[in-house]
Image (cartoon, rainbow, N blue to C red):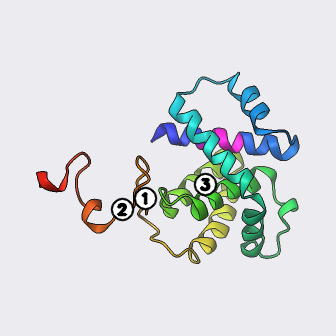
């Protein structure tokens, strides 16, 4: 899971950069990866997150504004704003990532990149949003590897075992 943490950190860095210097994603990715060593898997995950936030930014920003009482999106610290955007994208559009995992990762990112108080701020907004999401908070709805729906029968099966092997 360390690889996904690094990918989220890179996604926040890219989103921050794009927030202040809008450019096409291909150029942003090319410039960014020229300076980093990352596995293909980490790069793919990072780019999918950034592309998802970019494609759904209006929806994501609207949701954030709904949950951020008395905070204008533009007045939020840029790092916090982009961490929340990333997490909101994961909670709204990525069924393979449980919302609780997303919130924990976002809080850790906020503490690392912004500060302890930012962790509380990010947690408050995301926890309010999580309560309105109609899916399990602690389990994914789809497999991160196959994208297939997860049901109760397959959820309890050890990885790599088929129903016939049990």
Q: Position of residue 33 (x, y in %)?
A: 68, 26
Would you say residue 9 sits in the magenta stretch? yes
**Residue 160, disc:** none
Q: Residues within 10 Å of mark 2 (few under 14, many from 20)?
A: some
Above or below: residue 62 compared with residue 30: below
Quadrant in which the C terminus appears = bottom left
Q: Position of residue 113 (x, y in %)?
A: 69, 45
**Residue 142, disc:** 1
Whichever of labels 1 and 2 marks the residue nearer the N terminus, that label is: 1
Question: Spatial distance from mark 2 to mark 3, Cα to Cα?
Answer: 24 Å
Quadrant in which the N terminus appears = top left
**Cβ–Cβ under 8 Å for marks 2 and 3:** no
Q: Residue at x 54, y 35 (%)?
A: 42
**Cβ–Cβ under 8 Å for marks 1 and 3:** no
Question: Spatial distance from mark 1 to mark 3, Cα to Cα?
Answer: 21 Å
Above or below: residue 21 compared with residue 86: above
SS for dot 2: loop
Q: Residues within 10 Å of mark 3 (few under 14, many from 20)?
A: many
Determine which residue is flagged by label 2. Answer: 150
Q: Work out whether residue 4 or residue 31 is closer to the camera in this orientation and state it.
A: 31
Q: Residues within 10 Å of mark 1 (few under 14, many from 20)?
A: some
Whichever of labels 1 and 3 marks the residue nearer the N terminus, that label is: 3
Specify the segment rendered in magenta.
8-13
Whichever of labels 2 and 3 marks the residue nearer the N terminus, that label is: 3
Q: Main secondary structure of the magenta part?
A: helix
Determine which residue is flagged by label 3. Answer: 106
Q: Work out whether residue 81 or residue 165 is closer to the camera in this orientation and state it.
A: 165
Q: Quadrant of residue 141?
A: bottom left
Q: Residue at x 79, y 31 (%)?
A: 27
Is residue 34 found left or right of 101 in the rendered image?
A: right
């Amino acid at each position: 899971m360390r690889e996904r943490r690094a990918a989220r950190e890179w996604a926040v860095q890219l989103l921050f950069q794009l927030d202040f210097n809008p450019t096409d994603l291909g150029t942003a990715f090319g410039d960014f990866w020229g300076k980093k060593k990352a596995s293909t898997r980490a790069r793919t995950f990072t780019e999918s997150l950034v592309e998802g936030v970019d494609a759904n930014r209006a929806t994501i920003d609207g949701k954030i504004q709904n949950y951020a009482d008395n905070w204008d999106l533009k007045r939020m610290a840029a790092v916090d704003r982009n961490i929340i955007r990333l997490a909101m994208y994961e909670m709204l559009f990525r069924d393979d990532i449980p919302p609780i995992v997303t919130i924990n990762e976002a809080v850790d990112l906020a503490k690392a990149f912004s500060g302890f108080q930012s962790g509380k701020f990010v947690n408050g907004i995301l926890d309010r949003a999580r309560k309105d999401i109609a899916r399990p908070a602690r389990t994914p709805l789809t497999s991160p590897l196959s994208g297939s729906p997860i049901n109760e029968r397959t959820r309890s099966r050890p990885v790599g075992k088929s129903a016939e092997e049990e």
